[in-house]
Amino acid sequence: GNSVTQMEGPVTLSEEAFLTINCTYTATGYPSLFWYVQYPGEGLQLLLKATKADDKGSNKGFEATYRKETTSFHLEKGSVQVSDSAVYFCALIAPSEGSTLGRLYFGRGTQLTVWP
Amino acid sequence: DAMVIQNPRYQVTQFGKPVTLSCSQTLNHNVMYWYQQKSSQAPKLLFHYYDKDFNNEADTPDNFQSRRPNTSFCFLDIRSPGLGDAAMYLCATSRRGVSTDTQYFGPGTRLTVL
C-alpha cells in the first residue's frame, strides 16, 4: 500500500538554526512527493514538490530531494525564521489507482516552533 | 487572486442540524476533493469529483454527501452532524488528478457542533 512516515514533533528551534524533518514513504509504482505547510487556522499551502527520482524541490529556502534508493524526501532549511513556525506535512500521490484519482497520502504532520 | 475559496470560514451548527459547506475555484480544474482534518491530525480524504463523476472513499460515513453543480462549485452536505464531525474541512482541486499534478487547497471551513 501507500503510506508516509514523518518525524514526530514538536520540533523547537532557535532562529537561524538548521532544520531537518525526516520523511520516508512506501508506494506502489513511482509516486510524486510533496511538502505542504499549514499555518495556524489556515488551509494547506504547497511548499515544494518532486515528481521523479533525484529531483530536488525548493522554495523559500526549503529543500527536499527525492531519494528513491532510501525512499525518503527529507525537508531541510539552512536558517529558520520565526515566521516558519507552522505544521509541515509530507505527502505522496501514487500513480493513478482506479477510482482514487490523485489521492494525497499524508504523514501525521510535524509542528515546528521557532523562537527568536 | 484567490484560487480556491471556501465559505464560510467558520460554521457553528447544532447536533443533528444539517449543514452545507461551499467551495469554489477559479482554476478551471477537473478534479475537486473534500478532506476532513481533525485536531492535530493529517487530512483525511472523504470523496472527490472528476468532472461530474463522484467517487466516495470506502470509509466515508453516509452522513456526508456532496454535490458539484458545475466545474467551479462543489458542496459538502452533512445531513445530521454529530459531535465527532467537528473538524476543519478542506477543499482542494487538481487539474487532471494525475500524480504529477499539484493539489491546491482552500483556507478551510472550521465546523463546530454544539
Image (cartoon, grey):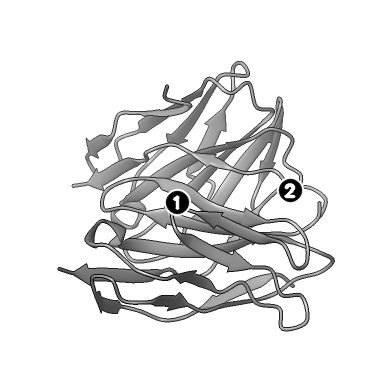
Assign the C terminus of chain A to one quadrant of the image.
bottom left
Residue drawn at x 78%, y 67% as measured from the top left: A53
Q: Are marks 1 and 2 on the same chain?
A: yes
| Residue B60 appears in the rendering | no
In this rendering, would A102 be left or right of B43? right
Q: Quadrant of residue A16?
A: bottom left
Q: Which residue is mark 2?
A: B100
Quarter the N terminus of chain A occupies? bottom right
**Are discs 1 and 2 less than 8 Å apart at CB?**
no
Query: Mark 1 — residue?
Result: B36
Q: Residue at x 60, y 44 (%)?
A: B47
Residue A62 is left or right of residue A99, and the answer is left
Percent of width and height locating residue A2 = 70, 70
Give the quarter of the image for residue B10: top left
Q: Is residue A68 left or right of residue A114?
A: right
A65 vs B60: above or below: below
Looking at the image, which residue sits at the far left?
A116
Label 1 Cα crowd, 10 Å radius (few <14 / some 14-19 / many 20+): many
A58 and A91: which is toward the camera: A58
